[in-house]
Image (tube, coloured by chain):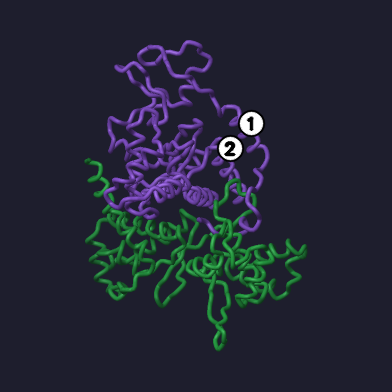
Amino acid sequence: MSQRKRVAAVGSQTKHFRRSQQVVLDEDDGDMSLTQPTSSQVQKARENFTPVQVDRKVAEVVQFILIKDQKKIPIRRADIAKHVIKEYKALYQDIMKRADRTFEQVFGLKLVEIDSKNHIYILVNKLQPVPGEPISMCPGNPKTGLLFVILSIIFMKGGTVKENVVWNTLKKLRVDVGEKHEDFGDVKKVIIDEFVRQKYLEYVRIPHTDPLEFEFRWGQRAEKEVSKMKVLEFIGELHNQEPQSWTQQYREATSVETSQR
Amino acid sequence: MSRPMGDSHKRFLQTLMSNGIVSSLQAKALHRHCCETHGAHYSPDRLDEFIDVINAQLQPMFMHIRKGMSEEDGLQYYALVNMAETDVTRMSSDYADNELELFRKTMDLIVDSENGTASSTDILNCADSLKSKKMKKKETEHVLNKFVQDKWLNEKQGEYTLSTRCIIEMEQYMRMIYQDLIKMCFVCHNVAFQSQICENTTCGIKMHLPCVARYFKGRSDPHCPSCNDFWTHEIPEIQQAQSQGSQSQSSSAVPAPNPTPSTSSTRRSRRS
């Protein structure tokens, strides 16, 4: 069948997407070659590639990042360079700047560096969530509710909580981490694997404890994406109180809110 | 020059991206919601212009919001299409090689069939002979379920059909691969899978079921619009007209109720 051939041909063009998808953060460091190119190198590269070629590269970078972000996998600069930018690496800065502008101007997203040492990025949403969406912006994902509850517990307890506190609170809400949950499956795995990998939560060992004890904090994605004021309003609704009645949390929420806007 | 996008456009795009496909009713409600949320000017009959603004900006990214008709209810839907890769590699980040091969086999079966369906039995038989990696029965059923969940296939009583999203996204690719095997609907001139075919073998035109229903409405003695032979098939009922009218009215009169619990709507995530 000639169809197979065609599929293979088109497939090769996008294969690097798939391959890099499987390697979440591959270890070998393509980043070494990404030392700042000299201005003459950049100049030469700008002459070597036509504007159409560079446009195409920008589109590829945007798609690559969007695909990864669909699974909320943090993106390494080295992976972008190795799998997409390739021989255009002298123009890395140019291309990334334009990709970033596209995210903001077209998609309402922002590329944020969450690890400046290893150059790891995530895409965060610039649009505020609003109630009453005719169709949900995050359909069919019951896990977002679970995550929001955990973030609320952490925030209300001052930013850090022992894991047992989280497990016990969830149990009161009839989510038992020891049992398989109808919507979430293995709840503990979702929380300490998935949410942690997606940078919504941090799950760290408390030093000098025997037996081992762990605690939760907000992850970097949560800090960028989730409004503390929204959390406080949510808690206020539950308790039928004004958000202001939690003085310390209210102060923190307003200070973040003003520094980010 | 193309107009820049406002936040209303961005919100519309994000919601479309995370849903994959939305009906035109949902799109209308969403259009209104996005404009009102961001205080943008809202004109109910300008949805397509609103989408054109987005499409102009998406074009350099080789993406496009495309409209298409559902073969089941005859309604219009909108989907975000990737123009750079309109074939099954579009699905490659979500599926393994043998799963993609199974999908192609299923498409083959559907295209070869007269009425645009493939039975689960036939698909399961294909799974035995996959070149990339054979699949067991249980596994095949699981993968088929995944295709349905991800809105690539529809399933009804063990019969699989191509979903509206699949047709919108892969129409060009399928036309290229299957060429003459793909027939157009005589009425709406879009590709036709789930359809009726004229029994006159020298004619053999196809018509979508909703198009048949509309075309022969109120005619007791239906004849083929091309060869004028008697149309032997049962004429389906028009199913959507009523509900569409009343729904679109209510959606423009009152804000749609929020179907999601407050915990998830207050979250800021986009995609699942």
- Residue B15 position, x and y percent, is 52, 50
Q: Amino acid at mark 1?
A: Ser
Chain identifier matching the purple colour in the rendered picture: B
Residue ranking furthest to the bottom: A208
Chain bearing tag 2 is B
Sequence-first disc among 2 and 1: 2
Q: Which residue is mark 2?
A: B44
Quadrant the C terminus of chain A occupies: bottom right
Task: Give the percent coordinates (x, y) of residue B131.
Answer: 26, 49
Q: Which residue is mark 1?
A: B246
Residue at x 45%, y 57% (from the top left corner):
A70
| Nearest the eye: B11 or B137 | B137
Query: To which chain does the residue with label 1 belong?
Result: B
Q: Is residue B60 visible?
A: no
The N terminus of chain A is located in which quarter? Answer: top left
Nearest the viewer among A115 and A138 is A138
Report the residue at 57% width, 87% height from top: A209
Which type of secondary structure does the marked residue at label 1 adopt? helix
Asked if residue A51 lies left or right of residue A227, the reply is: left
Is any atom of residue A20 visible in this view? yes
Q: Quadrant of residue B123?
A: top left
Q: Give the image location of residue B133, x and y in percent.
A: 30, 52
Sort mark 1 into few (<14), some (14-19) or many (20+) by Cα contacts within 10 Å. few
The residue lying at 42 percent from left, 30 percent from top is B194
Q: Which chain is green?
A: A
Name above or below for residue B221 compared with residue B262: above
What residue sits 35% from the left and 21% below the top? Answer: B205
Along the line of sight, the residue nearer the viewer: B271 or A24: A24
| Horizontal side of residue B141 vs A88, given as left or right | right
